[in-house]
Image (cartoon, rainbow, N blue to C red):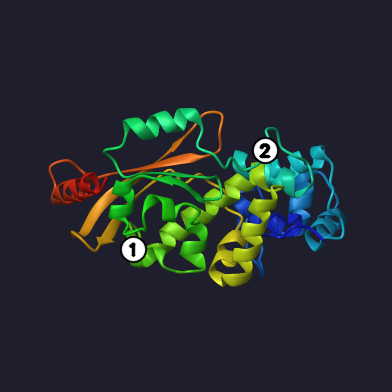
């Protein structure tokens, strides 16, 4: 059975249905019962038969050649990340296929040490917490750094449903949920065969209809930054920016939080910093 993480047929249907026919040179004026491209239109654009597209979407054929995958990606106007995802769904490993890094590399350790005055966390590619400094734990009302290690942000957001109680993202919870799932989708281009990654996605899909819905949309994009209003038990609400820093040679990411200098939010963050320093 194909993995739930990457189903070729569902991806093709999702991406076919989002294309505006006029954007790919198909004249308007024809009444359509469904949105997007018809199967025969995709087939024509990709240079394959309509029956071939039908068999791919229905899962009766799952291993098109790399040349056909490339043609489908061009016809569907996929982004680079989505093209990699399509290749993997068709059982073609993209370059650089790897596994989840579960240790903080030396380069990241040096950054962590130099940026200790900021709330900072290190996550794996599947959003499992590898490291958190005391200030981040104070900011998000987490247990001690040692106790917080191993928490997964995807599980906390979609299964435990407690992330929204801790902080409200700019644009609302839906904006954050979409960004988180799209980032996980992007990680699937390299990590879809990793057993830990597969287990996470399969488990959360089964427990969260919302996650399954967003996952099936097929959007793949990096989650780089977001402003949040943190509901802190010590200083009340404060607005912070959370920025993701990638580490060369590793798939871990550093999340660094900051507040706009000279604002009440910065003053509240400084008060939390003083608390964290006293606890050390």
Q: How many neighbours does mark 2 have within 10 angstroms: few (below 14), some (14-19), or many (20 or more)? A: some
For the question of whether residue 13 can be seen, the reply is yes
Drawn side of residue 13 relative to residue 235, left or right: right
Q: Which residue is mark 1?
A: 166
Number of numbered discs visible in the structure rendering? 2
* Screen quadrant of the N terminus: bottom right
Considering only order in the chain, which callout, 1 or 2, is on the residue closer to the N terminus? 2
Q: Identify the residue at horizontal 56%, vertical 33% (top origin).
A: 250
Q: Residues within 10 Å of mark 1 (few under 14, many from 20)?
A: some
The C terminus, quarter of image:
top left
Q: Tell me: 119 left or right of 3.
A: left
Name above or below for residue 45 compared with residue 94: below
Of residue 211 and residue 30, the one placed in the foreground of this image is 211
Say whether marks 2 and 1 touch (CB < 8 Å).
no
x, y (%) of residue 97? 69, 37
**Residue 153 drawn above or below residue 208:** above
Picture coordinates of residue 16, whole percent (x, y): 67, 55
Residue 146 image point, x, y percent: 42, 51
Q: Secondary structure at mark 2?
A: loop
In x, y percent, where is residue 169?
Answer: 35, 58
Q: Nearer the viewer, residue 228 or 64?
A: 228
Q: Is residue 78 visible?
A: no
Q: Nearer the viewer, residue 234 or 40?
A: 234
Residue at (66, 66) in percent of width and height: 32
The residue beneath circle 2 is 98
> What residue sits 70% from the left and 51% below the top?
195
Cα separation between marks 2 and 1 = 33 Å
The residue sitting at 35% across, 46% down in the picture is: 242
């Amino acid at each position: 059975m194909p993995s739930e993480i990457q189903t070729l047929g569902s991806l093709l249907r999702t991406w076919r249905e989002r294309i505006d026919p006029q954007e790919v040179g198909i004249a308007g004026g024809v009444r359509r019962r469904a949105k997007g491209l018809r199967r025969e239109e995709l087939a024509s654009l990709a240079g394959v038969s309509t029956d071939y597209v039908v068999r791919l979407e229905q899962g009766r054929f799952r291993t098109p050649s790399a040349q056909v995958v490339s043609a489908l990606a061009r016809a569907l106007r996929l982004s680079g990340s989505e093209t990699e995802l399509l290749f993997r769904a068709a059982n073609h490993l993209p370059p650089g296929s790897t596994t989840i890094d579960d240790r903080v590399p030396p380069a990241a350790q040096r950054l962590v040490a130099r940026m200790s005055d900021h709330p900072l966390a290190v996550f794996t590619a599947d959003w499992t917490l590898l490291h958190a400094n005391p200030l981040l734990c104070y900011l998000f009302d987490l247990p001690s750094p040692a106790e917080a290690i191993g928490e997964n942000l995807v599980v906390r957001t979609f299964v435990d449903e407690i992330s929204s109680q801790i902080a409200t993202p700019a644009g609302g919870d839906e904006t954050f949920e979409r960004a988180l799932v799209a980032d996980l989708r992007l990680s699937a281009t390299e990590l879809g065969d990793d057993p830990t990654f597969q287990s996470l996605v399969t488990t959360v899909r089964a427990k969260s209809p919302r996650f399954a819905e967003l996952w099936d949309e097929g959007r793949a994009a990096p989650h780089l930054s977001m402003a949040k209003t943190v509901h802190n038990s010590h200083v009340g609400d404060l607005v912070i920016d959370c920025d993701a820093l990638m580490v060369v040679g590793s798939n871990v990411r550093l999340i660094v939080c900051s507040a706009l200098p000279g604002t009440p939010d910065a003053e509240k963050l400084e008060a939390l910093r003083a608390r964290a320093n006293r606890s050390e």
